[in-house]
Image (cartoon, rainbow, N blue to C red):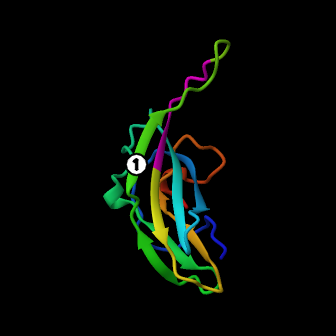
Amino acid sequence: MLIAGTFLLSCLTSNANHIVGGAIAVTYNGAPNSFHIKLNFYRDCNSGGAGFDPISQVEFGIYDLVTNVEQQCVNPTTFSDAILTLGDACFTPGLCVEHGTYEVDVTIPNNSNGYYVSYNRCCRNVVIINIANPSNTGDT
């Protein structure tokens, strides 16, 4: 069974102008068809944008790898956040990045096509210079 983070598709999209980036990790729990999904999500503390979404508003979409048909939407069951320590004694970058972690255990039925997991969130931090119109560009 193939599982990976990827692009586009549905579930839920929220809005704010503060996203720095993120990544989804999926690990096998050891029980048949049982997996742990973990989203590491990063936001700019100084952007004035909204804080992290409550777990009731976050959904991970689980999609068929071949057909792209949504198979499940699951809400995380745990959330934690912390301000990252950036720089060292010689250099302090003047940035504030907050790290949020959303996690859930899920059972996924057998599927010979495999699956991928996706989460969508709008919008990126306005100071990003290598994305056209980042305040209207989401992160998947």
Look at the image and tell me in which quarter the C terminus lies.
Answer: bottom right
Stretch of the chain drawn in magenta:
92-101
Locate residue 29, reporting x and y percent: 56, 63
Indicate whether residue 96 is drawn in magenta. Answer: yes
The residue drawn where x is 60% and y is 72% is 116
User: Is 122 situated left or right of 113 in this image?
Assistant: left
Height in image: 138 above or below 12?
above
Locate residue 45, reporting x and y percent: 45, 34
Look at the image and tell me in which quarter the N terminus lies.
Answer: bottom right
The residue lying toward the viewer, choosing from 123 and 121, is 121
The residue drawn where x is 34% and y is 60% is 57
Residue 118 position by quadrant: bottom right
Locate residue 84, reporting x and y percent: 53, 31
> Helix or strand or loop: what does disc 1 sit on?
strand
Locate residue 25, reporting x and y percent: 59, 57
The residue drawn where x is 55% and y is 74% is 33
How busy is the neighbourhood of tag 1: few (under 14 within 10 Å), some, or many (20 plus)? some
Which residue is the site of mark 1?
79
- Residue type indicated by callout 1: Phe
* Residue 30 at least partly seen: yes
Height in image: 94 above or below 74?
above
The residue drawn where x is 37% and y is 43% is 51
